[in-house]
Amino acid sequence: MPFLRRRNYLIDKHFQLKHLLITLILVALFVLILLTTIFLPYVFELFSDVPLSEKAKAADVALVLHQNIWPGVGVAAVFIAVASIFITHKVAGPVYALKRVMREIAGGNMRVRAKLRKGDDLKDMETALNEMTESLETTLIFMDRELKIISSNMAEMERKLGLPDIPGSELLEVAEKVKNEIKVMEVSLGKLKFGDKTVR
C-alpha cells in the first residue's frame, strides 16, 4: 500500500466528534467546579451581613476575576478542542488505514500489507494484521499447490481409465497419491476455525 500523507484531520467524523464532545463536557464540568470554588466565597460575602466596604471589595474582586477568567476559559476550550481533534486523529487515521487493508484482504488481495505512519498509534495492530495476512497467504498458497497436485493426479487417473488393459494396481497407486494429498490438505484445514467449529 503506498505511503500517503493524510491532510484531513477529521478521518472518522463520528468517532472524533463524539470524543471531542465528551472532552468538552468534561472540561465544562471542571470549569464549573473551578469557578464555583473561586466565586462562591465572594458571592456569599456579597449576600452576608458584612459591612458595605467589605461587600464592595468582594464585588471588585469578583468583577476582576470575571473579566480575566472567561477569556482564559475560552482560549483553553478552543485549545482543548483542537488538541482533541489532533489526538483522536492519531487513532482514527490508523483505524481508517487498517480498515482499508482489511477490506482489501476480504476482497481476496493477500499481497496487501498495512503500513502506518511513523508516530501513529496502533502500531501493534499493524504488526498483528500483517502477521495474520502473511499466515493466511502462506496457508492459501500451500492449499493452492496441493489442489494443483490433486488435479494433476486426477487427470492422470482419468487418462489411465481411458486406456485399455491398464492394471488395477496403477489406478490404485494414483488413487493413493490423491488420498495422501487430501490428507495433507485436511491437516492444513484442521488448523483453521470457522464459526464455532474446527474444519476437519
Image: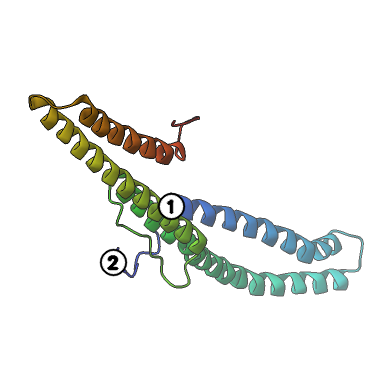
**Image coords of residue 107 (percent x, y):** 28, 45
Judged from the image, the secondary structure of the residue bearing numbered disc 2 is loop
Q: Which residue is mark 2?
A: 2
Q: Quadrant of the C terminus?
A: top left
Q: Amino acid at mark 1?
A: Met
Judged from the image, the secondary structure of the residue bearing numbered disc 1 is helix
Question: Which numbered disc flags the more N-terminal residue, 1 or 2?
Answer: 2
Q: Is residue 13 left or right of residue 179?
A: right
**Foreground residue, 175 or 110?**
175
Q: Which residue is mark 1?
A: 132
Which corner quadrant of the image does residue 5 belong to? bottom left
Q: Amino acid at mark 2?
A: Pro
Which corner quadrant of the image does residue 170 belong to? top left
Q: Quadrant of the N terminus?
A: bottom left
Q: How far, Cα to Cα, is label 1 from label 2?
A: 20 Å
| Numbered circle sitting on residue 72 | none
**Image coords of residue 122 (percent x, y):** 50, 61
Residues packed near mark 1 inside 10 Å, few (<14), some (14 to 19) or many (20 plus): few
Residues packed near mark 2 inside 10 Å, few (<14), some (14 to 19) or many (20 plus): few
At a point 57% along the width and 68% down the height, the residue shown is: 74
Decide: is 10 above or below 195: below
**Foreground residue, 122 or 192?**
192
